[in-house]
Amino acid sequence: MKRKDFLYLTGMGISASMLSRFTAAGSPVMHGTALRDVDVAIKKRMADVALNAARSKGATYTDARLGRYLNQFVVTRDKNIENIVDTESYGMGIRVIANGCWGFAATDKLDNDSIARAAETAVAIAKENARLQLEPVQLAPQKGYGEVSWKTPIEKNAFEVPMKDKTDLLLSVNDAAFKNGANYVNSVLFLVNEQKYFASTDGSYIDQDIHRIWPVFGVTKIDEKSGKFETRSSLSAPRGMGYEYLMPRESDKIKSQTTLYRDRYDMLEDAGAAALQAAEKLKAKSVEPGKYDLVLDPSHLWLTIHESVGHPSELDRVLGYEANFAGTSFLTLDKWKSGNFKFGSSHVNIVADKLQPGSLGAVGYDDEGVGTKQWDIIKEGVLVNYQAIRDQAHIIGLKESQGCCYSQSWQDVQFQRMPNISLQPGKETMSPADMIKNVEKGIYIIGDSSFSIDQQRYNFQFSGQMYYEIKNGKIVGMLNDVAYQANTQEFWNSCTAVCDKNDYRLGGSFFDGKGQPMQASAVSHGSSTARFNGVNVINTARKI
């Protein structure tokens, strides 16, 4: 893939802090390579070579991850197909504990001698590391599962869909936007298939086939008289699904100020609406700064959840072990130990979930062989838990890992990554329309855009894609130049209502960055539309 196309793709609808060096992108391969399977018996034999070699050199624990990472990028601009690229990355990462310390090595040469050498190197590194350790690794116990498998429950493998169908769809998306007045359109289809085989000395041999899809576009509209321009990006959410995500169903559409999408996405319809709304944004009045009640759609709120709840509840950030790209955390252990730290109002119930169907983070087992699960992070507004993996569990008194360990590729060491973190829907029947009609002075925000948050995930600013002014329970027009500011605790304590489960939808990021060297991880965040009272809104167009 050309660098300019990758930069373009990763810049559409995502923030800079979510980017990564993205080593899992791999090397270009012939189109169709993704359809070739690797026999599971061969994977097991290769993994056993690693386990036995590490054990023979003194490792007390070993896990081997054989990973085959397949990506496909289909990129169009206006009337043209810009690029079509298939990539593959294939190799094995071996992690060991020896003399009480971690060691890791990886190889892309998968003959027995190369695998054994990599395992022996991992043990040698662990023993060298042990000379500096302050205390030995405490690994939470994990039962061996034997030989098991898991696959993303897809209906249609996107890699098997003819390329012509994909390019025809994207060019039709561009046409739909042009017909409604767009000046420029870009559209991209990004597919991922992670074929991962995990084996450990716990007795697990886990074969997983994970699929993700992300259709995305950007529309630009120019005012020829003033030279000003506005953009509107797609309201799609990247998903852990197959090509069926792009087969629209009326039952998955929510008719609000614009059409919003649940588990199936109508890319053509959204592109047509985007062109009209970009034009409308050119005429929208600039917001008057002040306090407003905000009604936040899930297509916007997912990013606020990600930054202000997901990152600060990562235990390694809480402990100060991790600070890259998202800083540490204000959710320190003393707040959790108090048992009554009011993170948010009683409407705020936030759950970590690695099982949720259709989500980006859904897998059967994490990258250290732990079966995945769901657990509470915030319960009725109170901080009750964090995100922890096997060597962190004892720190917060857990007897087992929460199953949220992940590595972006075979050549990177696995570490704690954010599971799907989602705001649970309200129990009372309430639609977005019901919520809006009770707002006297407010703003309804749809879609995500820029953000800024400090290094403890406390003080922040977010903006969106479309802002609608609410007066006395009715939407009276579109606004522009809106951003809201708050601190995390004040913001979530201002939550006064959450719509019911019928409005619940997923957003998410393909490129959540963390670590040094940085690794990318895909994660979803769900919510229903939620109301936050008395939030400070600024005008981003004002100059000093």
Image (cartoon, grey):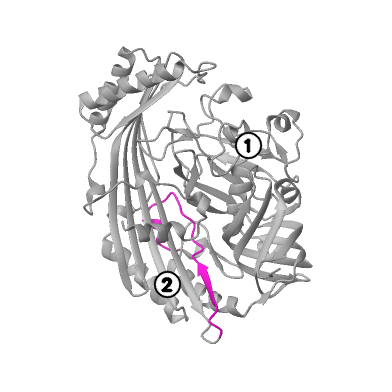
Mark 2 lies on residue:
185
Picture residue at 43% right of the left edge, 81% below the top: 179
Look at the image and say whether residue 34 sits in the magenta stretch.
no
Q: Residues within 10 Å of mark 1 (few under 14, many from 20)?
A: some
Relative side of 223 to 339, left or right: left
**Which residue is depicted at the point 30% across and 12% down?**
56
- In the rendered structure, which segment of residues is drawn in magenta? 226-248
Residue 444 sits in quarter: bottom right
Instruction: Say what amino acid the circle numbered 2 marks.
Output: Val
Percent position of residue 310, x then y: 59, 43
Which quadrant of the figure contains the N terminus?
Answer: bottom left
Residue 170, which numbered label? none
Residue for point 26% across, 60% down? 162
Left/right placement of residue 379 relative to residue 524 reads right
Mark 1 highlights which residue? 376
The residue most toward the bottom is: 225
Magenta portion: prevailing SS class: loop
- Whole-percent x, y for residue 463 in the image: 62, 61
Q: Report whether 95 appears left or right of 33.
A: right
Residue reaching furthest front?
544
**Secondary element at tag 2:** strand
Query: Residue 114, located in which quarter of the rendered image?
Result: top left
